[in-house]
Image: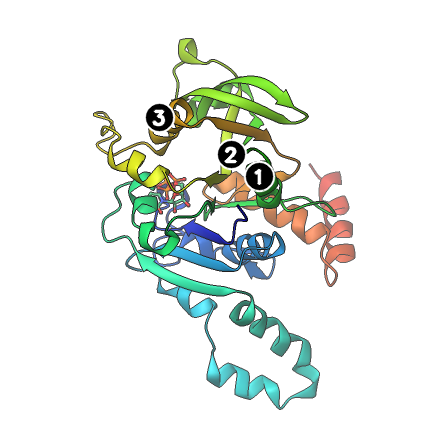
Amino acid sequence: MKIRKAIIPAAGLGTRVLPASKSIPKEMLNIVDKPAIQYIVEEAVEAGIEEILIITNRGKGAIEDHFDHSFELEANLKNNPSKKKIYDDILKPVHMANIYFLRQKETNGLADAIAKTRHFIGNEPFAILYGDDVITNKGGKPVIGQLMEAYEKYEKGVVGVKEVPRKDVSKYCSLDVKPLEGRLMECFNIIEKPTEDQIISCYSILGRVVMPPEIFDIIDNTPVNEKAGEVYFTDSMVLLAKKLGLLALDFEGTRYDMGNKLGIMKANCEFALDHDEIGEDFKNYIKELAKTL
Ligand code: UTP
């Protein structure tokens, strides 16, 4: 079945990037000249997604404003021929896709955020793009599109994975996988935030997932993780793996974690080097700077 809908959970507290994220949602932190979440919406649209639901919470109204008209600004820029490009740029996010918003009233974790989208999704498979993970695949297929293709072929949930350095696995999760075809694997188990002796492999889920609609009933029946006080989405995915099967795709692309300070700096640096307007100047600046290090 073709995947048409996506959700972008963006209701997390962003504690790892405080104080920047105190009054500005971390999803709105910029990468050169666009907020992180715009890159994520662009990825979904490029993959053919038609309807996007962004999950926000109190204090994240700036996300809604970004995808809406700004009449005063538009009126001002519209009549100024020298600002034509800026005018076009600010209208892009407004017309990009059908974007809807839903508030997660309490920050009860990712599984709870996803559970809230059941009525929007209905009875069809859907994509999930984590609001703080910007993932690019320069010149290639958008990463969520790679997962959608795998889902459409096998009709099984798919998680986007990468091998992470062993010392970092404990920050993410560890997957029990077996090769299936090309970059695709079967996934049998996932350990969330494993201790060293619990690590099964260095494959971790990084920000992109495609789920069948059955995941909603599964989330409702997943026991709360006692230590975390919330349902772990990975626990629901393990139940899905046991019931209907689950695939893991070692996707082609580079992921930037906008939920952590180093990730934000890497994204800005690499996107700036590639930028039409400032790329050359920035490269020269970096070269000069590197000499002083
Ligand atoms: P994270 O755990 O990376 O985000 O959740 P966080 O909670 O903001 O991180 P800290 O506070 O820096 O540790 C992964 C994704 O799930 C969303 C987040 O916004 C992020 O995109 N999320 C998380 C929700 O939408 N709701 C939640 O209750 C928790």
- The tag earlier along the polypeptide, 2 or 1, is 1
| Total marks placed | 3
What is the spatial separation of the Cα atoms under label 2 and label 1, in whole angstroms? Answer: 6 Å
Per the rendering, the mark at residue 239 is 3
Instruction: Provide the secondary structure element on which disc 2 rests.
Output: strand
- Classed neighbour count for the residue bearing mark 3: other residues with Cα under 10 Å, few (<14), some (14–19), many (≥20): many
Side of 146 relative to 281 (left or right): left
Side of 77 relative to 113 (left or right): right
- The tag earlier along the polypeptide, 2 or 3, is 2
Where residue 47 appears, as percent x and y from the top left, is 61, 51
Residue situated furthest bottom in the rendering: 79
Residue situated furthest top in the rendering: 197
Q: Quadrant of residue 91?
A: bottom right
Residue visible at 60% across and 36% down in the picture: 153
* Mark 2: amino acid: Val
Residue visible at 57% across and 61% down in the picture: 34
196 or 229, which lies in front?
A: 229
* Mark 3: amino acid: Leu
Residue visible at 32% across and 54% down in the picture: 119
- Classed neighbour count for the residue bearing mark 2: other residues with Cα under 10 Å, few (<14), some (14–19), many (≥20): many
Report which residue position mark 1 lands on: 147
- Asked if the residues shown at circle 2 and circle 1 are in contact, with their CB atoms under 8 angstroms apart, the answer is yes
Report which residue position mark 2 lands on: 158
What is the spatial separation of the Cα atoms under label 2 and label 3, in whole angstroms? Answer: 14 Å
